[in-house]
Amino acid sequence: MTAAWTPESWKQYPAAQQPNYPELGELDRTVDQLRRLPPLVTSWEIDHLKDSIAAAQRGEAWFLQGGDCAETFDGCQTESIASKLKLLLQMSLVIVFASRKRIIRVGRIAGQYAKPRSSDVETIHGVTLPCYRGDIVNGFDFTQESRIPDPRRLLRGYDRSAATLNFIRALSEGGFADLHHPENWNLLFVNEVKGEVAKRYRDLVRSLGDALKFMETILEGSTVNELRRVDFFTSHEALLLPYESALTRPSIRGIGHYNMGTHFPWIGERTRSLSGAHVEYFRGIRNPIGVKIGAKVSPEELIELIDRLNPENEAGRLTLIHRLGRQHVEARLPGMIEAVRRKERRVLWVCDPMHGNTVSTAHGRKTRRFDDVVDELRLSFAIHHACGSHLGGAHLELTGDNVTECVGGSRGLTESDLESAYQTQVDPRLNYEQALEMAFEIAGKLTESRAP
């Protein structure tokens, strides 16, 4: 690693998962346009998130991160955006009511347009084309024209991110998140949901309403501002380095560079190489950052990665998102926790129980078994407790849409149900009921940890 960092020093290192653009001149012109566009978020918002993550590291808050596997340009619509926010608000309400902890709400939203892939190409019926890498790179349709990486899509990604952020801010600040009116968070189809999970949520809302009325009666009608608005942060995997570096700007306070395209960027499992361009880029930005950690990383490599990305051992700076899978979490997680504890490194531990549990049906359809997802989360809670650590958050792929992409859950979805509402273009997501089930599971575990 060179000592001198710049927003483009990553170019000196091998960059994995980058598109093969046919016209590099067009890419350069597009990146130049991005550099001149306004930032999407501010350094003050980013620092506020870092302070909140530091609180989660101390056990004072819970980090809830969720959203689509990959956003689409067509998904930048009013109800689609609002439904994701509604679901995260409902989940956070469940968790905060049980745990009495502040919730840090982070959406996989307003920039999650690129996806890493295991191969550069895809073959269907003897035809081989570039793989789909997300709407910010190329099109999903399996045609030669659609699959050619197009740099101009970077500008469309910026525009969609800006529109999404603008709408989220308007909702968050305009009373949409007011705890006095959780009925505003109901999704379009929610009245059709008759299961036990939905009933538990409605009972909780009624209990909350009674509690608020009682509190405000005691306080003679006064209200707390925090009950009427919430902080909501954005995140995405910072995969396309030309795009990320173009949105990296020096702070007007003179305290370093921030990625101002999102509050919380993360490095994926496929791009966390110590000698790679992504680690070089991330080491220089002042955002709080995440790193996905899979089963193959050794404790020694993990410590080296931590020290590369957070050499000052700064509170709130680094979040480790372990995605080990139900089959590996018991064998791999304790050694990682012990290495970090022994070296006294400050990190926030977050469980991603989704990515290590992806399977394919006999017909080749990707899915996840809800029981595997829940089991990995439960085991992660228990392992952290046994190791003298604490799990501080969950990272989930979910949607407010009424999809059938993961099997299991309270509705008992089977593989035969997948075709009825399988909408994802990449990885399967938890649906509304399954996501609420996860929230109640998290709430239950956090309540156990509060018990004397």
Image (cartoon, rainbow, N blue to C red):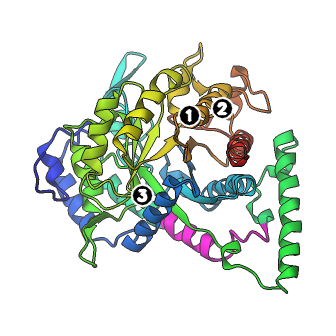
In the rendering, at what x and y percent does residue 445 appear?
A: 69, 41
Q: Residues within 10 Å of mark 1 (few under 14, many from 20)?
A: many
- Left/right placement of residue 21 relative to residue 398 reads left
Q: Is mark 2 in CB contact (under 8 Å) with mark 1? A: yes
Look at the image and give the residue range highlighted in magenta.
163-181
Write the residue at 67% across / 79% down. 225
- Against 345, residue 49 (above or below) is below
User: Whole-Å distance between the Cαs marked 3 and 2?
Assistant: 27 Å
> Which quarter of the image is occupied by the N terminus?
top left
Q: Please tell me the numbered disc located at residue 374.
A: 2
| SS assignment at label 1 | loop
Q: Please tell me the numbered disc located at residue 316.
A: 3
Write the residue at 60% across / 27% down. 368
Mark toward the start of the polypeptide (1 vs 3): 3
User: Whole-Å distance between the Cαs marked 1 and 3?
Assistant: 22 Å
Indicate which label's residue lies in the foreground, 1 or 3: 3
